[in-house]
Amino acid sequence: MPESPDHFDVLILGSGAAGLSLALRLPADLSVAVVAKRELSEGNTLYAQGGISAVLDAGDSVESHVRDTLIAGAGLCDPEVVRTVVERGAENIRWLLDQGVQFTRSPATGTSGYHLTREGGHTHRRVVHAADATGKVVETTLVDRVRQRPGLTVMENHIAIDLLRSDKMGEKGPRRCVGAYLLNLMDGHVRAIGARFVILATGGASKVYLYTSNPDVATGDGIAMAWRAGCRVANMEFIQFHPTCLYHPQAKSFLISEAVRGEGGRLLLPDGTRFMPDFDERAELAPRDIVARAIDHEMKRLGIDCVYLDISHKPADFIKEHFPTIYERCLSLGLDITREPIPVVPAAHYTCGGVVSDHHARADLPGLYAIGETAYTGLHGANRMASNSLLECLVYSELAAEDIRQRMDQVPPIPPLPSWDESRVTDSDEEVVVSHNWEELRRFMWDYVGIVRSNKRLERAKRRVNLLRHEIREYYSNFRVENDLLELRNLVEVADLIIQAAQHRKESRGLHFNIDFPEPDESQRKPTIMIPDNYVPPSSS
């Protein structure tokens, strides 16, 4: 147990697959706190439908998985990282099995004993899954294990405000991360929590867009906090838009899994015409950026609100067995997917960029780690291949745990932490400012920095984000913090990073498509690294 309730060996911000896996992999004698912005299970992992890619079948190979990932990443993946993640895939699936995760079994699809599906960009069936609710099964299993683990502190309904750096407290020597300020959303109290190691596992930032598959908590908190603390951020222009979110007024953020297309689903226009073969020889199994742009093109060309995904040519029992969650959700809205196609639209889904982290998951600020969707590791490049995300969460939680175990004895004690200062702020009397700015930000990001971009659209977005940043900073300085304000503060930071990165990349590659630069430029075949003004290289910090 910790020396005090405000000091821990390891502070994990985020409770998805990455954060919970790390908590369970750390030595039992360490004091560990897991912080969740809402209840412990709420986050992107819970809503992940498809599965986890790993080489499990004798007919598959590491080389094939590596090659598919590199192709999907459009030249920007780090080959060494890709190989590390792929080679550790099977052992991490076994680790999940040891935790109690129950995957769908079916020896008919290969030698693994599990039903393996195929998704966009994969040349083999290698996606292990739990029906069409893999994320939910993984998340709830890990939550149960975390709650049962002795000595592990869970802090639900807390949002991190900012990271704490030793140099801001008068500490001599290299600067390092020593904790974070946390706001208790239940009582409004802010306290400083110290830790020898702090892990950002806060997920992505797709709530920066008006239409998204993500839950409300995906507001880029870890990316924004790391940037403010002096860490580099990379590849923020590469936002993955999932091609198929359910289009229905009562179906907020409901995803139609990639696996529906993997099992033969066809994308159709309202008149029943199939269109994907006109855009790519892989048709519905092309990578997500190609499918999303094709749908966007057809919607704009025809002036239609959605396209349709049809799996009804498959037997009804097959559909109900493989996609029970999707079947039940659609049926509750009056759609029988065994008989009719599903109306779908693209929506912001996955943040391929993030906090720059090395092969041990370390960020630039010593003592700080970034894992999962928060991090930029080099795995995804310019486009994430389907079902590589949960795999990355698992592998990098393993790498971080290994590194923390080796470095624990080298880290000095936590210095005294300054209390949160509210002496110069008051309660807000103009909360409409927050709600208005929230809506404005998400709408202009969708309109100007979405699936298809242009120089003029990006310039308009940059002017608007500059105005919003000024307003939000002024508001933050004058009023007591609360959840919506903190999330908006982080979203506007992330929006600015996305816009700047998109303006910097004067080509089209992967998920970034600019009509003023429609072709890839090999001279720009490198990551977009954003460096904050307060950045200090780790070796000289």
Image (spheres, rainbow, N blue to C red):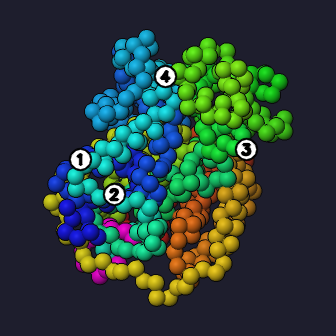
Labels 1 and 4: the sequence-earlier one = 4
Q: Amino acid at mark 3?
A: Pro
Checking the image for residue 249, the label placed there is: 3
Viewer-side label of 2, 1: 2
Let me know if residue 422 appears in the view.
yes
| Quadrant of the image occupied by residue 304 | top right
User: How many numbered marks are there?
Assistant: 4
| Quadrant of the image occupied by residue 219 | bottom right
Question: Which residue position is annotated with label 4?
Answer: 117
Which class describes the residues within 10 Å of circle 1: few (<14), some (14-19), or many (20+)?
some
Q: Quadrant of the C terminus?
A: bottom left
Question: Which residue position is annotated with label 2?
Answer: 154
Which class describes the residues within 10 Å of circle 2: few (<14), some (14-19), or many (20+)?
some
The alpha-carbon separation of the residues under discs 3 and 2 comes to: 36 Å
The alpha-carbon separation of the residues under discs 1 and 3 comes to: 46 Å
| Residue drawn where x is 40% and y is 79% of the image | 420
Side (left or right) of 281 relative to 43: right
Labels 4 and 3: the sequence-earlier one = 4
